[in-house]
Image (cartoon, helix red, strand yellow):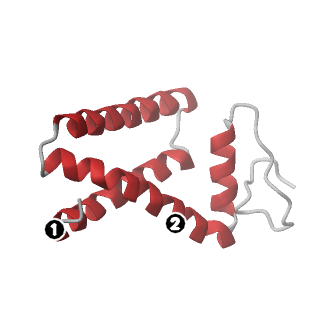
Amino acid sequence: MDERRDARSRSDGAPREQSVGESRVDHVVAVVLGESLLWPVLGIVIAHAAVFLAPVLVLAVRDRNPFAMAGAVLLLAVTVFGLHDARRRAGRTKPVHWLVACVWLAAIPVAALCGYYGIF
């Protein structure tokens, strides 16, 4: 079997092996994305992260809380610098990058709904 094929294209059902330059988080995310039965679990993880991030965004934007603003800027800075560093090292976009982007994209509508209904 060709070594370059990943878990999404393997037909024998063998688990995907971790490559040398791949971190443990990258490996776990790649395995979860390769197994379609685990996609609902990944959706729940994204939803939980978005619900965690939503109050920070609501408090930073609506209430203009300086601590929430600092927290939101810090979370955004860590995300941007972490993704930039990981992309610079790997030279390509990994599944973890898309997972983090999905969390931020899911947190924005959740924060808008929380702000609209006055939950936070």
Residue 115 drawn above or below residue 27: below
Name the one closer to the observer, 96 or 49. Answer: 49
Give, as a three-letter code, the residue at label 2. Gly
Q: Nearer the viewer, mark 2 or mark 1?
A: 1
- Give me the C-alpha separation between circle 2 and circle 1: 24 Å
State which quarter of the image contains the N terminus: bottom right
Helix, strand or loop at mark 2: helix
- Return the x and y of residue 105 as percentages of the image width and height: 34, 57
Q: Residues within 10 Å of mark 2 (few under 14, many from 20)?
A: some
Place residue 13 in its image quadrant.
Answer: bottom right
Choose the circle earlier in sequence order: 2 or 1. Answer: 2
Name the one closer to the observer, 90 or 99. Answer: 99
Name the one closer to the observer, 30 or 2. Answer: 30
Which residue is label 1 attached to?
116
Q: Residues within 10 Å of mark 1 (few under 14, many from 20)?
A: few
Q: Is residue 102 visible?
A: no
State which quarter of the image contains the C terminus: bottom left
Residue sitting at x 41%, y 50%: 101
Helix, strand or loop at mark 1: helix
Residue sitting at x 53%, y 59%: 45
Residue sitting at x 68%, y 61%: 34
Place residue 64 in its image quadrant.
Answer: top left
Q: Which mark is residue 43?
A: 2
Q: Is residue 49 visible?
A: yes
Residue sitting at x 63%, y 51%: 29
Looking at the image, residue 71 sits to the left or right of residue 50; the answer is: left
Name the one closer to the observer, 47 or 14. Answer: 47
- Return the x and y of residue 21 as percentages of the image width and height: 69, 31
